[in-house]
Amino acid sequence: MSKKLTVAALLERKEQLTNRANVTAEIYIPSLDAEIVIQKPSRALCLEVLAMAQDDSKEDKADLHMAYNCIVEPNLKDPGLQKEFGCVEPYDIVEKLFETGEIGSISGHCLKLAGFSDGVKLVKELKN
């Protein structure tokens, strides 16, 4: 059962709460038969990607943008890697390495790290 959050509890967890930006996770990529490391996206990146997803002219780039910016291993921003794969735009590397469905899944896992799938739950509706 959950308990009410108090100032004292927040102060006890201060270090943990201030270091949550560095959260990473390993995910398995079937087409590569290998694991990659993703990091929790910043709030700004999440908002940017969500805005892109709602813009008809940018919606096809939203998952690419999230994956490109959250994958930390391998480093997709490596100029040598992009050159070897013939990338014209930086995001091209994402499409060259991963299957279409994998890109969406990677983006989804990144959003989960930022708390987008877990959400909050109504415990009890308060009445005036």
Image (cartoon, rainbow, N blue to C red):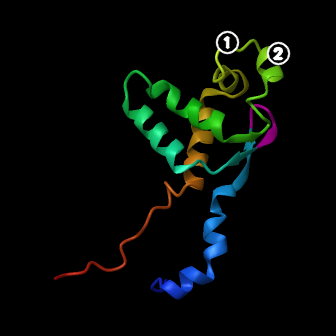
* Tag 1 secondary structure: loop
**Residue at 55% from the left image edge and 49% from the top image edge:** 111
Residue under numbered circle 1:
88
Residue at 45%, 85% in the rendered image: 4
| Secondary structure beneath label 2 | helix
Residue 120: x percent and y percent?
43, 67
Residues rendered magenta in the picture: 30-36
Question: Which residue is pictured at 81% across the width and 22% down the height?
Answer: 81
User: Is 35 in front, or is 21?
Assistant: 21
- The residue that disc 2 covers is 84
Instruction: Give the left or right position of residue 126, taking residue 53 as reference.
Output: left
Q: Residue at x 71, y 15 (%)?
A: 87
Q: Position of residue 98 (x, y in %)?
A: 69, 28
Question: Percent x, y for residue 123?
Answer: 37, 78
Q: Is residue 78 left or right of residue 21?
A: right
Viewer-side residue, 44 vs 67: 44
Q: Amino acid at mark 2?
A: Glu
Structural distance between the alpha carbons of marks 1 and 2: 11 Å
Q: Are marks 1 and 2 in contact (CB under 8 Å)?
A: no
**Residue 76 to residue 44: above or below:** above
Q: Is residue 12 above or below residue 121?
A: below
The amino acid pointed to by label 1 is: Val
Tag count in the figure? 2
> Can residue 15 be spotted in the picture?
yes
> Considering the image in quadrants, where does the C terminus appear?
bottom left
Left/right placement of residue 9 relative to residue 53 reads right
